[in-house]
Amino acid sequence: MKGALLVLVSAALLVPASQARVAGGSHVALVTAETLNELVAVSLPSGRILKRLHMPVDPQNVEAYAGAAVVVSTRGGSVTLVDPRSLRVRKVIRGFGAPHIAAFSPDGGQVAVILGRVIRKVFVGRGAHHMAFAPDERRLWIALGERATSIAVLDTNRETGRIARPRVIGHVDPRGLAHDLAFTPDGRYVWVTYDDRPYVSVFDARTERPVATLYGGPAPQHVRFDDASGLQQFGRYAYVSSGNSGRLRVFNWRTRRLVRTMRTPAGSFNLSIDRGLVATASLSQGVVTELLGHGRVSVRVAPSTRDVALATP
């Protein structure tokens, strides 16, 4: 965990979704059960619950990257670092105002930079929520709210040392109430979803202007890309979830054409992608669903499951 740089926002604490494998090569989904104050580790595709980890109150978001996982507890004002291999808590960092979302840099209100400990805090705007790192780590876009009228752009260039000392260099008008966002694997575009319309806008990351609009289903939507660490056979797709309609739309992100629409349990907003495997968590039904190709496995693990993260060793 020491080498993985984590960026958080207070009013939106940024933490990546976790991924892990157990003996036999099966995936493990880490799922936040906020009403139980737990992080639930679920073996996929069997649906067997491997472990329940007690978390500080109100664990909402979970992220994982490079053998590390992070859970953000909003009302608890804390971030919990978890080892996704041993499924043990490594450290709890407290003292945040209202953490919400977290994100790891691709190689490892206020943004907090964490490297084993909090090393810097930067005010980026009130309501900071979902965020997205550019693949080359030079830029970080942060939606200022779940219904954001502005997206803050931060300089996070590693070569100039800004990855640990980010600074706001501008703002993007999302042309609506932005909810979630993600960079394409080539870093040229940012897909932005909304809370007030059933569309996804594709922004040019350089000009910061919209260049395309896609139908994503009833708002709000979430978007993720399967970059699969550069593995070409997996990195072709964008996944857009519409929890209110129980649909997951799969796009070829280069051509922006719809490839497939899959059913998901109602309330499945958050999702995690790993090499063609998709996992969703239903906020309203407490169901974790694994989607691979045309196959689907669902298992109920809690009264409510907000976020999910897949982890690989």
Image (cartoon, rainbow, N blue to C red):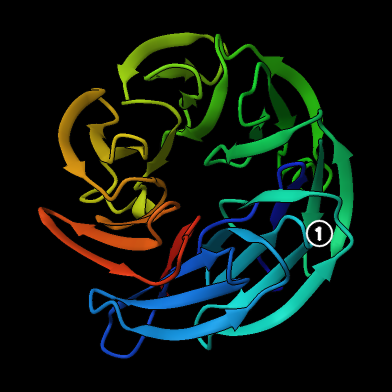
Which residue was labeled with disc 1?
77
**Which amino acid type is marked by label 1?**
Gly
Q: Is residue 138 above or below residue 50?
A: above
Q: Is residue 196 visible?
A: yes
Horizontal side, residue 76 vs residue 263: left or right: right
Secondary structure, mark 1, is: loop
Q: Residue at x 55, y 73 (%)?
A: 39
Quadrant of the rendered image containing residue 289: bottom left
Horizontal side, residue 227 vs residue 112: left or right: left
Number of marks present in the image shown: 1
Residue 295, x across and y down, in percent: 12, 59
* Quadrant in the picture for the C terminus: bottom left
Q: Is residue 253 above or below residue 69?
A: above
Q: Residue at x 44, y 37 (%)?
A: 222
Q: Residue at x 28, y 82 (%)?
A: 25
Q: Residue at x 72, y 39 (%)?
A: 156
Q: Is residue 282 above or below residue 94?
A: above
Q: Is residue 65 visible?
A: no
